[in-house]
Image: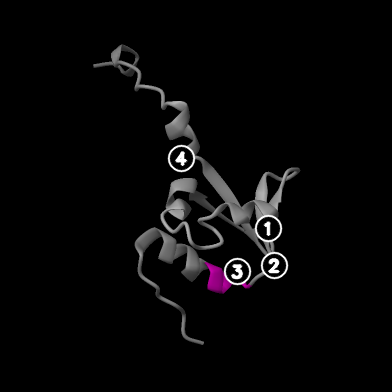
Amino acid sequence: MPVANLPMPVAPTNKNKHQDELIILNVSGRRFQTWRNTLDRYPDTLLGSSEKEFFFNEETREYFFDRDPDLFRSILNFYRTGKLHYPRY
């Protein structure tokens, strides 16, 4: 069946659009992308709460954090999996 004949998927509602928003976290120049709802799973943390808005840059549309990007990768993976794995140095 040609793709043109397939029905279009249902557009997300405004509520889902906000929850599934792709956001950019700039950690000392290294950019990480994740879904807003990934961070919202942990509302008592900086990234999961509205406190992160203090770090939002309107011009770049990114959240900027002056931290170690190599370690942040492990933190972001915790938000994704619920398990903390960190590199050994």
Residues rendered magenta in the picture: 68-72
Asked which secondary structure carries label 2, the reply is loop
Q: Which residue was labeled with disc 1? A: 64
- The image quadrant of residue 79 is bottom left
Can you tell which of label 1 and label 4 is closer to the viewer? 4
Give the alpha-carbon distance from disc 3 to disc 1, as whole Å.
11 Å
Of 51 and 65, which appears nearest the observer? 51
Residue 45 in percent (x, y) is at 51, 63
- The image quadrant of residue 69 is bottom right
Name the outermost residue toward the right: 59
Q: Which residue was labeled with disc 4? A: 19
Can you tell which of label 3 and label 2 is closer to the viewer? 2
Give the alpha-carbon distance from disc 4 to disc 3, as whole Å.
25 Å
Give the alpha-carbon distance from disc 1 to disc 4, as whole Å.
20 Å
Amino acid carrying mark 1 in the image = Phe
Q: Which residue was labeled with disc 3? A: 69
- The image quadrant of residue 26 is bottom right
Amino acid carrying mark 4 in the image = Gln
Give the alpha-carbon distance from disc 1 to disc 2, as whole Å.
7 Å
Along the horizontal axis of the image, is 53 left or right of 9?
A: right
Q: Tell me, yes or no, whether the highlighted magenta stretch contains residue 71.
A: yes
Asked which secondary structure carries label 1, the reply is strand
Can you tell which of label 4 and label 3 is closer to the viewer? 4
Q: Which residue was labeled with disc 2? A: 66
Amino acid carrying mark 3 in the image = Pro
First in sequence: mark 4 vs mark 3: 4
